Image: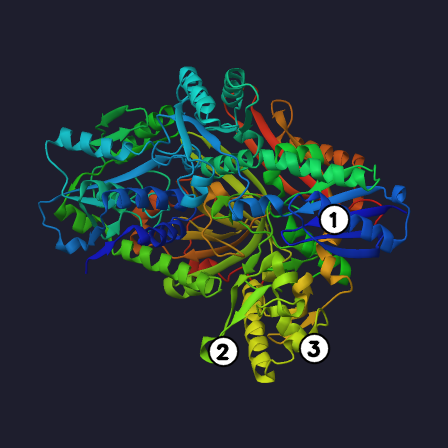
């Protein structure tokens, strides 16, 4: 049997669980710390002790984190980025970051550069690469002290040569500059791919620091097993990949909590509400998997085309501030956030929060109950009715059929949820508070193929079949169970500029990790 | 009645255009951004006037994008092409345009005329040449009324432009398409210069109002957390064709078009069925697993994303995407023998004779 450690590093809490096959041996919750590392260390010590196992018995560690999404949403710890697009004279009408919120543009410095270069759909050059222009930008990068650049060329998914050439010129001129290429991150669709590359570049130093902290925390706790980080689609990536592509972790939080909820309840079709300290995420489970957003998803106000679960967030959590009464009763969206344990009334503070209401109503027993004994029962009922109403609206939004699905409540704040929401039964699984960490622990394994196939001797269908098979083999070698594999991405881009009728095929398959059956 | 469209209305225009654009006519997001940024920069709204208010001797000019929409999501315009095309046509004609026209519905082709109108201060006429989108430039009601596509100007991002004079609208398409491919697969054009009198006779009227209304319906239904499909079927006398997931998508950018076929697997009520959706820029033919047609050009095959309800263009189709397909009857002009010859299934090489949706829908549903 395989012992796996799942850790979820959220904005407020760091959770850890240890799973023995399908069995949750222990789950703990600790406060996330500024340095990340000491929070993980505290959670690790607690969970190892609670599980009563030897540290070297743990085979593998999986970490899920919302650290990078939060950095973008909260506009903090972002590096300034030189956003360089190769495409002039085309593309000038919509420069890089044209559709970003102004405060985020300012946070990454607003350094936009448009240069001649890029390709036509058939591989011809729109214009030769403006190498002098790149050297001028390099001088500005040095002068402004910028440490990261994102280079996006028109049609780089069919030919990345110019992006590579630009990286070479930039890193020769500015030693130590990190250069992200859009072709490494996204597919056809210039604005979305470019935005993802710029966001990724702005997160590189935070990624380096964070991954180092993860590693140090594990080592500090005496763990020497390999560790992985979960990405958008619920699969794992190697820690060193996260240093280069932090943007790929963006929606891993909701993915983990939904998969964790499915795992803990055994329910395959449900609405999942994950109530944290500040916000509640609502999404739908279909056949045990989070329902995917089908087209585009905003992250911090920026349009992306990553594969992500369709999640709706509202400003309601354990730390949400309650004020006023009667007509002027207000629940949120302000929250005391991670200061819950010092500012909420039951923890000796002055602010009335949703957690205080839960304690006063008897739904939860935490902190000092006597601190909320003065609250009028009618008032408590009114606030609980408002909370129920907010949750009902959010749940209704995620329902796409009139079927009476159950609602699974997870997350530390799920004590706020009533027993029924809009006539739907609410399930609270054991270990509900650490569902995220459970989701990380059961993350899936992927196999990916992305390369050029020649169609002169074989048909397109045969090549797609080959790519599927190759991706499956990669996933199985990495530890996936063959019977659980399914294709989640399959795309071919004909490359008209290459002889022999070439096509670039991208296939990704995912499956469950072995050793999960009890 | 005339109405004004400002920067905040562009989303409705882009979404409504994308729905009626039957998968073609370009990405609504890029269309919205382009028109918005010009309106905001020039600080103007654009007036849309009914065709009947236009003097008979006015010069009316459609401006639009031509080429493969797959190119436009990657190689964004420089922004000057449409203006270059219009002013070169004006120079050639020795006369300034008085009104602008939108040639087709589409996420980009409904919005580009607004961008040009915002820039030049010209008014836009409430109508278009298709009541939908079609891949080729002769496929407009104007052709059915013997209005010539040329003289026409075609312009690219690099500053190249050319004037075309052709003996027929089909020849205009052939020649302009070859130029478009050389220009990188997408170009901006000003064409079908016509008098107010010709416009009144040849244009499909009121379609920009319809585009705005459809866009408004999509936005308000989505805000009320409802899938807009039902409301759109109700509003446009449409038919539910199928709800299905993309399981294979084969596409090529050839001959200046985005061509391809998507195979779909039924969801919900359509579970267990398979469908084949063929496109050339636009969705043109939907067949079931036995090759029987469910909807055929020139009737409209509109796609919404099955979960979120936003219009889906052919270039944004991808593996795993859930679609709800809705059929709308084409303008009666398209169902005439002349209309079918211009844009019917036979022209595109599909092995079916045209049959209207009203007949096809429901025919094989119980099967």
Q: Which residue is mark 3?
A: A362
Residue at image coords 52%, 50%: B287
Point out the tag, 2 or 3, that comes first from the N-terminus: 2
Q: Is residue A500 above or below residue A230?
A: above
Q: Which residue is mark 2?
A: A325
**Same chain? Circles 1 and 3:** yes
Residue at image coords 54%, 28%: A181
Q: Please state if A41 lies on the left or on the right of B332 as rendered.
A: right
Which disc, if any, is residue A7? 1
Residue at image coords 41%, 15%: A132
Of all chains, the one bearing label 2 is A
Colour pattern: rainbow
Of all chains, the one bearing label 3 is A
Q: Nearer the viewer, mark 1 or mark 3?
A: 3
Residue B146: % across, % down: 20, 42
Depth check: A234 or B311 in front? A234
Point out the tag, 2 or 1, that comes first from the N-terminus: 1
Of all chains, the one bearing label 1 is A
Residue B302: % across, % down: 44, 52
The C terminus of chain A sits in image quarter: bottom right
Q: Is residue A122 above or below residue B193?
A: above
CA–CA distance between discs 1 and 3? 30 Å
Point out the tag, 1 or 3, that comes first from the N-terminus: 1
Q: Which SS class for mark 3?
A: loop
Q: Nearer the viewer, mark 2 or mark 1?
A: 2
């Amino acid at each position: 049997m395989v012992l796996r450690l799942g850790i979820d590093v959220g904005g407020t809490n760091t959770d850890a669980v240890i799973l023995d096959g399908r069995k949750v041996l222990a789950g703990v919750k600790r406060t996330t710390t500024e340095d990340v590392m000491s929070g993980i260390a505290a959670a690790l010590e607690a969970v190892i002790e609670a599980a009563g196992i030897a540290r070297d018995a743990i085979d593998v560690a999986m970490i899920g984190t919302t650290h990078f999404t939060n950095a973008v949403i909260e506009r903090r710890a972002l590096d300034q980025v030189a956003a360089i697009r190769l495409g002039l004279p085309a593309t000038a009408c919509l420069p890089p970051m044209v559709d970003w919120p102004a405060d985020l543009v300012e946070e990454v410095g607003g350094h936009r550069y448009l240069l001649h270069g890029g390709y036509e759909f058939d591989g011809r050059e729109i214009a030769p690469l403006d190498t002098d222009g790149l050297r001028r930008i390099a001088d500005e990068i040095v002068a402004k002290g910028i440490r990261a650049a994102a280079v996006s060329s028109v049609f780089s998914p069919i030919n990345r040569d110019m992006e590579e050439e630009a990286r070479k010129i930039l890193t020769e001129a500015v030693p130590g500059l990190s250069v992200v290429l859009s072709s490494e991150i996204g597919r056809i669709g210039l604005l979305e791919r470019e935005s993802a590359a710029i966001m990724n570049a702005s997160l590189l130093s935070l990624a380096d620091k964070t991954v180092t902290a993860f590693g140090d925390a594990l080592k500090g706790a005496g763990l020497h097993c390999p560790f992985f980080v979960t990405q958008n689609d619920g699969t794992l990536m190697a820690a060193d990949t996260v240093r280069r592509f932090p943007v790929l972790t963006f929606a891993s939080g909701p993915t983990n909590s939904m998969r964790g909820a499915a795992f803990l309840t055994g329910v395959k079709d449900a609405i999942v509400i994950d109530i944290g300290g500040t916000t509640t995420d609502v999404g739908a489970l279909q056949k045990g998997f989070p329902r995917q957003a089908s087209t585009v998803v905003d992250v911090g106000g920026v349009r992306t085309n990553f594969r992500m679960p369709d999640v709706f967030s509202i400003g309601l959590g354990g730390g949400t501030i309650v004020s006023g009464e009667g007509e002027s009763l207000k629940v949120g969206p302000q929250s005391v956030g991670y200061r819950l344990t010092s500012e909420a009334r039951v923890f000796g503070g002055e602010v009335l929060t949703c957690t205080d209401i839960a304690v006063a109503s008897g739904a939860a027993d935490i902190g000092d109950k006597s601190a909320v004994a003065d609250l009028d029962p009618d008032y408590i009922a009114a606030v609980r009715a408002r909370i129920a109403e907010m949750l009902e609206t959010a749940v209704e939004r995620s329902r796409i059929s009139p079927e009476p699905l159950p609602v699974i409540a997870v997350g530390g704040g799920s004590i706020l949820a009533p027993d029924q929401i809009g006539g739907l039964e609410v399930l609270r699984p054991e270990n509900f508070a650490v569902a995220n960490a459970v989701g990380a622990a059961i993350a899936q394994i992927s196999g990916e193929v992305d390369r050029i196939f020649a169609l002169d001797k074989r048909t397109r269908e045969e090549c797609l079949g080959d790519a599927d098979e190759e991706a499956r083999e990669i996933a199985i070698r990495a530890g996936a169970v063959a019977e659980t594999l399914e294709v989640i991405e399959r795309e071919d881009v004909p490359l008209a500029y290459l002889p022999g009728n070439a096509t670039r095929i991208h296939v990704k398959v995912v499956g469950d990790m072995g050793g999960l059956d009890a | 009645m005339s109405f004004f469209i400002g920067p905040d209305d562009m989303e409705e225009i882009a979404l409504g255009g994308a729905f009626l654009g039957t998968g073609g006519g370009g990405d609504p997001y890029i269309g919205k951004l382009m028109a918005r940024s010009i309106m905001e920069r020039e600080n103007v709204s654009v007036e849309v006037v009914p065709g009947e208010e236009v003097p008979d001797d006015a010069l009316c000019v459609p401006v639009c994008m031509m080429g493969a929409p797959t190119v436009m999501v990657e190689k964004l315009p420089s922004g000057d092409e449409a203006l270059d095309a219009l002013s070169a046509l004006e120079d050639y004609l020795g006369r300034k345009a008085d009104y602008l026209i939108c040639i087709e519905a589409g996420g980009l082709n409904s919005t580009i005329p607004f961008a040009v109108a915002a820039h030049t201060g010209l008014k836009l006429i409430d109508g278009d040449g298709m009541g939908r989108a079609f891949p080729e430039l002769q496929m407009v009601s104007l052709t059915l009324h013997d209005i010539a596509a040329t003289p026409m100007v075609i312009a690219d991002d690099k500053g190249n432009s050319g004037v075309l004079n052709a003996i027929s609208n089909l020849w205009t398409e052939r020649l302009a398409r070859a130029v478009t491919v050389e220009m990188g697969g997408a170009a901006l054009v000003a064409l079908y210069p016509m008098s107010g009198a010709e416009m009144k006779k040849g244009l499909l009227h009121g379609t920009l109002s319809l585009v705005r209304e459809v866009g408004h319906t999509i936005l308000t239904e989505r805000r009320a957390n409802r899938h807009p499909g039902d409301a759109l079927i109700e509003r446009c006398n449409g038919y539910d064709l199928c709800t299905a997931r993309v399981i294979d998508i084969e596409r090529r950018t050839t001959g200046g078009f985005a061509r391809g076929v998507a195979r779909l697997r039924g969801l919900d009520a359509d579970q267990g069925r398979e469908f084949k959706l063929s496109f050339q820029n636009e969705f043109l033919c939907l067949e079931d697993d036995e090759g029987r047609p469910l909807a055929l050009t020139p009737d409209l095959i509109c796609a919404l994303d099955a979960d979120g309800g936003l219009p889906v263009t052919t270039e944004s189709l991808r593996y795993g995407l859930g679609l709800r397909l809705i059929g709308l009857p084409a303008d009666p002009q398209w169902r005439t023998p002349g209309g079918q010859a211009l844009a019917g299934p036979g022209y595109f090489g599909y092995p079916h004779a045209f049959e209207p949706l009203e007949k096809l829908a429901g025919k094989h549903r119980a099967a």
